Image (cartoon, rainbow, N blue to C red):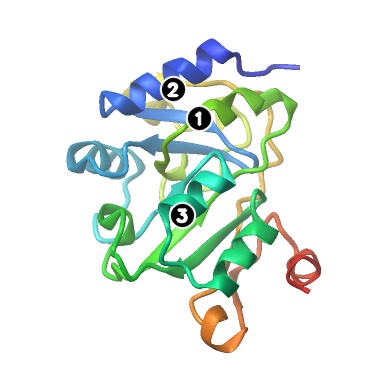
Amino acid sequence: MIGLTNADAATFSRCMAVRGVAVFPADTVYGLACEPDSKEAVRRLYALKGRAPGKPAAVMFFDRDLALAALPELGPRSQAAVSRLLPGGVTLLVPNPARRFPLACGPEPETLGLRVPALGDALAALRAMRWPVLQSSANAAGAPDARRVQDVPEEMRDGADLVLDGGELPGTPSTVLDLRRYDSEGTWETLRLGAMSPEEIGRRLA
């Protein structure tokens, strides 16, 4: 089984620190990652993906407690939902009244896409990452998602500063779940079906 080492995770962290762009394995599909507050890094990531500059991306933390600590404005219901749903194969749209990570938010600065991957043994070294990344799937816009590093377009791999091979991934992207009305109304909406089923979401939020 191919797995990432502590040295791989340290290299990934350094790449983010110097505002590089990396291809990396998550719990679902391969992604592109960069420092979320670097305009130049975000520009390069979007250019590699062929993604329109105004479209939002997600911010991925590698530890749920760090994510909650970084978003102290979340209401109690939303905090509880994040604790129950993450880590896992779901991207949560949460209220962002402090307008944190604006480069990831696109035209809606008060909404943040939040990810914390469920890292199995092969990717466990990434849990050492102490700061988030802006991330998007490592495929051309509208193209199939990459479950192996070889499935990432060659020009994307060549253009990245770092490519981490974590072996074959499940290949189903994250479910996108809208929690923006969860505090006020206790409701949620599935915007994209993916790795986490509606049944699993319901069970976790019950």
Give residue 119's quadrant in the image: top right
Q: In the rendered structure, which disc, 3 or 1, sits on the residue that comes first in sequence? A: 1
Q: Nearer the viewer, residue 5 or 148?
A: 5
Q: Nearer the viewer, residue 43 or 146?
A: 43
Residue 142 badge: 3
Amino acid type of the residue tagged 1 in the rendering: Phe
Task: Name the side, left or right, on which 9 lies relative to 122.
Answer: left
Badges 2 and 1: C-beta atoms under 8 Å apart? yes
Is residue 67 depicted above or below 3 in this figure?
Answer: below
Q: Quadrant of the N terminus?
A: top right
The residue mark sitting in front, 3 or 1, is 1
Task: Name the side, left or right, on which 205 lies relative to 99.
Answer: right
Q: Which residue matches tag 2? A: 12
Q: Position of residue 71 (x, y in %)?
A: 42, 58
Task: Name the side, left or right, on which 63 lies relative to 169.
Answer: left
Amino acid type of the residue tagged 3 in the rendering: Gly
Amino acid type of the residue tagged 2 in the rendering: Phe
Question: Which type of secondary structure does the marked residue at label 1 adopt?
Answer: strand
Residue at 26% from the left image edge and 57% from the top image edge: 102
Residue at 61% from the left image edge and 54% from the top image edge: 174
Q: In the rendered structure, which disc, 3 or 2, sits on the residue that comes first in sequence? A: 2
Residue at 61% from the left image edge and 22% from the top image edge: 125
Q: Please rate how many residues cluster around mark 3, counting C-alpha atoms within 10 Å: few if below 14, some from 14 to 19, many from 20.
A: few
Q: Please rate how many residues cluster around mark 1, counting C-alpha atoms within 10 Å: few if below 14, some from 14 to 19, many from 20.
A: many
Q: Nearer the viewer, residue 154 or 69?
A: 69
